[in-house]
Image (spheres, grey):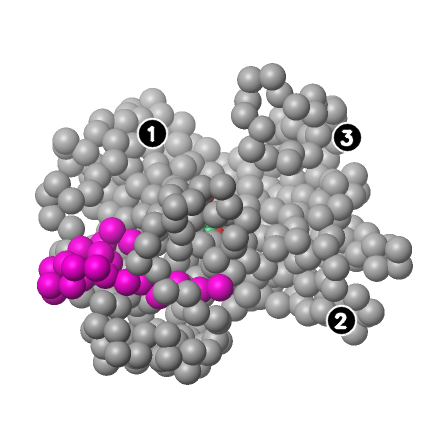
């Protein structure tokens, strides 16, 4: 393993990093600075949709960098129109706002929900959020997040959030009963950082119906589970629901920083000039990355690939690991999979790297696999071959 200094003198110590640095990548493989090869089942945390060095994306981005990187939102950016139209076509929604990250997309959604409330005369709007949720690390989005570790030390938190458990419609009804200040329900279809926890399809449909009855916005954070990862463009589409507000980021630009919040008719015109903005959001480079990522995904059939290879990967993991003492559950959909173990297993990230495999462990005891959507069945088999012995050895300790 390529050794990097344990603590940097000048970079703030915000991450428990592995002692590893990479020099280049190709497809689902990356090489460290010493030339060792790794299979990338993390994809920069569900970001590198097209893997590394995809020739079509590289050509498009090189072209764009030479033409224009940034102009500002004082002017029209033609690719914003193109990407917004495409996202609306794929989601059934009507308008998009562009930013540069997941938390910014969620921050925009939270502001939008509050403004939606104020426009209706609700002066202290409340938003329903979930246990184990992760929405980002700005003060508002960490307040919406359901992990006390993310919040600790940053109090006072932003008020106006009501927290409920997952997949329990009665709990949602009880928590909001007779409360005229509720304006939105904000959820991840499959919680990512919280441990790959899916919302049941039936639950999503019940929440949609409740939002319609009460005139609340259904806001679905698809930052991690969206953009084809589960085999549909957006994970909630498996349940046949359409949200009112949908934050996106991670996989949307295949590695170029980008975020978006896409809104349907109830929410698309809530923001007016002066209500929201960002310097970098929607810049020509990021927009080109978004447009080309979607175009290449369509050309290369990556939705179907994510579903098919994901099923195979999950099937193989279930055959090898299900029922073993210490394996609690294997869950997720498409190429967003989690293996929950009965005890904390953070050490597995380093051991996997030693074995030439990049993974992450989330929520302390869930091995998370979110590889690029170009993964082949042969590469999925390789992931299983490298990962299973590590988990078996860990369970035996
Ligand atoms: C990663 C993530 C975020 C935050 O995105 P950043 O780009 O890190 O700000 C928000 N929501 C979900 C569901 C995420 O997975």
On the question of residue 377 being in view, the answer is no
> 23 left or right of 48?
right
Q: Which mark is residue 322?
A: 2
**Residue at position x 39%, y 34% in the image:** 60
Whole-percent x, y for residue 76 in the image = 15, 36
Q: Residue 356 occupies which quadrant of the picture?
A: top right
Whole-percent x, y for residue 392 in the image = 84, 59
Q: Is residue 77 above or below residue 345?
A: above
Q: Residue 126 occupies which quadrant of the picture?
A: bottom left
- All told, the count of numbered labels is 3
**Residue at position x 14%, y 31% in the image:** 74
Q: Report helix, strand or loop for mark 1.
A: helix
Q: Which mark is residue 1?
A: 3
Q: CA distance from mark 1 to mark 3?
A: 35 Å
Read off the magenta span: 109-131
**Residue at position x 34%, y 22% in the image:** 66
Q: CA distance from mark 1 to mark 2?
A: 47 Å
Q: Is residue 254 above or below residue 388?
A: above
Q: Which mark is residue 64?
A: 1
């Amino acid at each position: 393993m390529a050794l990097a200094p344990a603590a940097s003198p000048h970079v703030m110590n915000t991450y428990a990093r592995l002692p590893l640095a990479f020099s280049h990548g190709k497809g689902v493989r990356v090489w460290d600075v010493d030339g060792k090869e790794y299979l990338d089942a993390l994809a920069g945390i569900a970001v590198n949709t097209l893997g590394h060095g995809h020739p079509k994306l590289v050509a498009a981005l090189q072209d764009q960098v030479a033409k224009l990187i940034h102009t500002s939102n004082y002017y029209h950016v033609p690719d914003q129109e193109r990407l917004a139209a495409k996202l609306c076509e794929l989601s059934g929604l009507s308008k998009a706002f562009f930013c540069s990250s997941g938390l910014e997309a969620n921050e925009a959604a939270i502001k939008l929900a509050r403004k939606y409330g104020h426009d209706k005369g609700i002066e202290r709007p409340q938003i329903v959020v979930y246990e184990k949720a992760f929405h980002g690390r700005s003060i508002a989005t960490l307040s919406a997040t359901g992990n006390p570790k993310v919040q600790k030390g940053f109090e006072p938190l932003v008020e106006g959030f009501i927290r409920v458990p997952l997949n329990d419609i009665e709990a949602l009804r009880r928590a909001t009963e007779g409360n005229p200040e509720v304006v939105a329900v904000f959820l991840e279809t499959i919680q990512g950082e919280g441990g790959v926890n899916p919302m049941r399809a039936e639950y999503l449909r019940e929440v949609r119906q409740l939002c319609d009855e009460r005139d609340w916005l259904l806001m679905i954070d698809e930052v991690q589970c969206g953009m084809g990862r589960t085999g549909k463009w957006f994970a909630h589409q498996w349940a046949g629901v359409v949200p009112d507000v949908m934050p996106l980021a991670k996989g949307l630009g295949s590695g170029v920083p980008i975020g978006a919040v896409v809104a349907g008719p109830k929410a698309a015109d809530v923001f007016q000039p002066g209500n929201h903005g960002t310097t970098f959001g929607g810049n020509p480079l990021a927009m080109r990355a978004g447009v080309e990522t979607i175009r290449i995904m369509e050309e290369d059939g990556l939705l179907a690939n994510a579903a098919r290879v994901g099923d195979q990967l999950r099937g193989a993991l279930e055959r090898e690991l299900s029922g073993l003492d210490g394996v609690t559950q294997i869950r997720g959909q498409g190429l967003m999979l989690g293996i929950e173990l009965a005890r904390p297993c953070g050490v597995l990230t380093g051991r996997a790297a030693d074995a030439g495999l990049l993974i992450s462990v989330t929520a302390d005891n869930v091995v998370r696999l979110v590889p690029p959507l170009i993964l082949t069945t042969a590469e999925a088999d390789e992931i299983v071959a490298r990962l299973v012995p590590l988990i078996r050895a860990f369970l035996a300790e």
